[in-house]
Image: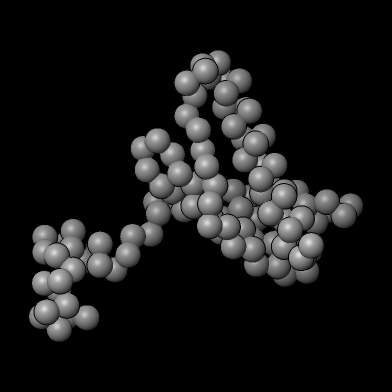
């Protein structure tokens, strides 16, 4: 067991509680599902930051979840979602309407 394991367990528990809350609010068996993946933990003493991606039916979001250790338990202090970062290739392709191969062939990158 690494130092990151208890933080990851707290992060998973946050997502379980979050989904239970929304399922209760929506009272719908087809409530949207959220899957958390690619978790990275950054430990700073009694503070930990989990960066991950959330897969939703409509796409992927980037999440940052801040935890604080209180009474030897990790508790969520802040959760933030934003649009998932797209690769530089994807952004350039969309911005200029050209392929990755075209960009590379022109020596742009």
Using the rendered view, name the quadrant where residue 15 is placed.
top right
x 63%, y 28%: residue: 20
Would residue 17 appear left or right of 104 to someone viewing this image? right
Task: Pick out the residue farthest to the bottom.
Answer: 107
Would residue 99 appear left or right of 23 to someone viewing this image? left
Q: Which of 56 and 46 is in front in this view?
A: 56
Q: Is residue 63 visible?
A: no
Indicate the quadrant containing the C terminus: top left, top right, bottom left or bottom right: bottom left
Task: Pick out the residue farthest to the front.
Answer: 1
x 54%, y 47%: residue: 36
Using the rendered view, name the quadrant where residue 50 is placed.
bottom right
> Could you say where residue 29 lies in the image, as x and y percent from the top left?
52, 18
> Could you say where residue 93 lies in the image, as x and y percent from the top left?
18, 63
In the displayed structure, would residue 39 be above or below residue 31?
below
Indicate the quadrant containing the N terminus: top left, top right, bottom left or bottom right: bottom right
Q: Can residue 11 be seen in this view?
A: yes
Q: Which of 25 and 33 is in front in this view?
A: 33
In the displayed structure, would residue 35 be above or below residue 23?
below
x 53%, y 57%: residue: 38
In the displayed structure, would residue 90 be above or below residue 76?
below
> Could you say where residue 34 lies in the image, as x and y percent from the top left?
51, 38
């Amino acid at each position: 067991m690494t130092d990151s394991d208890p933080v990851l367990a707290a992060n998973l528990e946050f997502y379980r509680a979050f989904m239970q809350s929304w399922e209760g609010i929506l009272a719908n068996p087809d409530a949207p599902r959220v899957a958390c993946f690619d978790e990275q933990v950054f430990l700073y003493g009694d503070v930990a930051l989990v960066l991950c991606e959330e897969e939703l039916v409509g796409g992927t979001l980037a999440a940052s979840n801040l935890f604080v250790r209180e009474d030897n338990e990790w508790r969520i202090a802040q959760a933030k979602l934003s649009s998932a970062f797209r690769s530089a290739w994807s952004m350039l392709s969309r911005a200029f309407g050209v392929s990755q191969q075209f960009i590379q062939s022109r020596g742009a990158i």
